[in-house]
Image: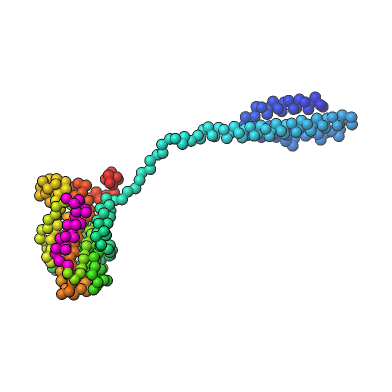
Amino acid sequence: MLGRLDQIEREALAALEKARDQEALQAWKVKYLGRSAEIGAIMEGLRELPKEQRPAVGRRANEVKRALEAAYEARLEALRQAVVARSLEQERLDVTLPGRPLPRGRVHPANQTLRQILAIWAEMGFQVYRSREVETDAYNFELLNIPAHHPARDMWDTFYTTREGVLLRTHTSPGQIHVMRERAPEPLRVVLPGMCYRYEQITARSEIQFNQVEGLAIGSRITFADLKGTLIAFAKRMFGQQVRTRFRASHFPFTEPSAEMDVECFVCGGEGCSVCKRTGWLEILGCGMVHPVVLQNGGYDPARFSGFAFGMGPERITMLKHRIEDIRYFWANDLRFLEQF
Ligand code: FA5
């Protein structure tokens, strides 16, 4: 029996050497240490042995069992280590590799210009005031001195809603009335940025939606000289100290007198090119002294107050600055365009 135990030990240890994975190891354990393993049977059968053999066989059987259990634990641990080592090898990270660049979002070109414009006006003491995009006919037209059937309405092709007298604002000028009615009779200096809508033919220069930045200053002694000085100061900050400007007479029903301001073409420096249509000048805004009727509609007494107003289009200014030839790029969401800014 002792010989058989030696044999079992040798055979089991040799078999253990060959177990190369968890599954083989498990099968080995069942065979040599499991419930129906031979060593268990030997221990159970001790009682049937002659009395004088029992202690020696019992001791040896225990020895072999412990030896096999220890060998099993050692083998199990060795296999675990091998798995860890293999995964370390296979999943090795090279921390010195350069990272993969992630595409970075950026501010839309129209918003870049809008922010720049607002920052300049803020520096010059103008507050930002926002008003609604859905307006009434009264605010968009009537209160701005444009009665129904007035031919000046043709300047603003309008998106009307199904509700009588409710429309999408065609310019930011209705905001003038809102802010005046809120603040009168206090003096004020505000800019009113926002989206406007016009039922126009979409072309390279005209969209059906676009931003405007309106400006309004009201006080007791504001003159046309203040208007010119302020707008020239703006142009210098926006386009550079050396930029030349000029004012041309124009007409808006809500200002009197009215003008348009041009800046010297910064593409050709005034010599004439395709961007300025060979004139050397670029129109950037409409402006004028607030019409007395509008002052009155806003709650200011025109005998005591005067003011100036202006309206500019950031997309047109962006087009001029970056020589963008078609305004339709702005809302087309084409990344090839947007990524250039
Ligand atoms: C006006 O809308 C006046 N409310 C401006 C104003 C305000 C004058 C206060 C006097 C006092 P106008 O229609 O010219 O004016 O538009 C002003 C600017 O908006 C234009 O110079 C242009 O930059 C921009 N704009 C007008 N229509 C479009 C369009 N369809 N697409 C893109 N930009 C436009």
The majority secondary structure of the magenta stretch comes to: helix
Establish if 241 lies above or below 34: below
Q: Position of residue 16 (x, y in %)?
A: 68, 29
Residue for point 15% across, 60% down:
228
Locate residue 298: give its quadrant: bottom left
Name the residue furthest right: 51
Q: Work out whether residue 258 can be spotted.
A: yes
Q: Work out whether residue 288 can be spotted.
A: no
Q: In the depicted view, which residue is nearer to us: 123 or 312?
A: 123
Establish if 92 lies above or below 143: above
Q: Position of residue 308 (x, y in %)?
A: 18, 65
Q: Position of residue 314 (x, y in %)?
A: 22, 55
State the scheme by which the image is colored.
Answer: rainbow
Which residues make up the magenta segment? 222-242
Q: Is residue 240 left or right of residue 107?
A: left
Which quarter of the rendering shows the N terminus? top right
Locate residue 4: give its quadrant: top right
Residue 145 falls inside the magenta stretch? no
Residue 226 falls inside the magenta stretch? yes
Residue for point 27% across, 60% down:
122
Q: In the depicted view, which residue is nearer to us: 303 or 108?
A: 303
Q: Position of residue 258 (x, y in %)?
A: 13, 63
Residue for point 10% across, 60% down:
249
Q: In the depicted view, which residue is nearer to us: 281 or 237?
A: 237
Residue for point 14% across, 52% down:
244
Q: Is residue 45 left or right of residue 209?
A: right
Establish if 131 lies above or below 341: below
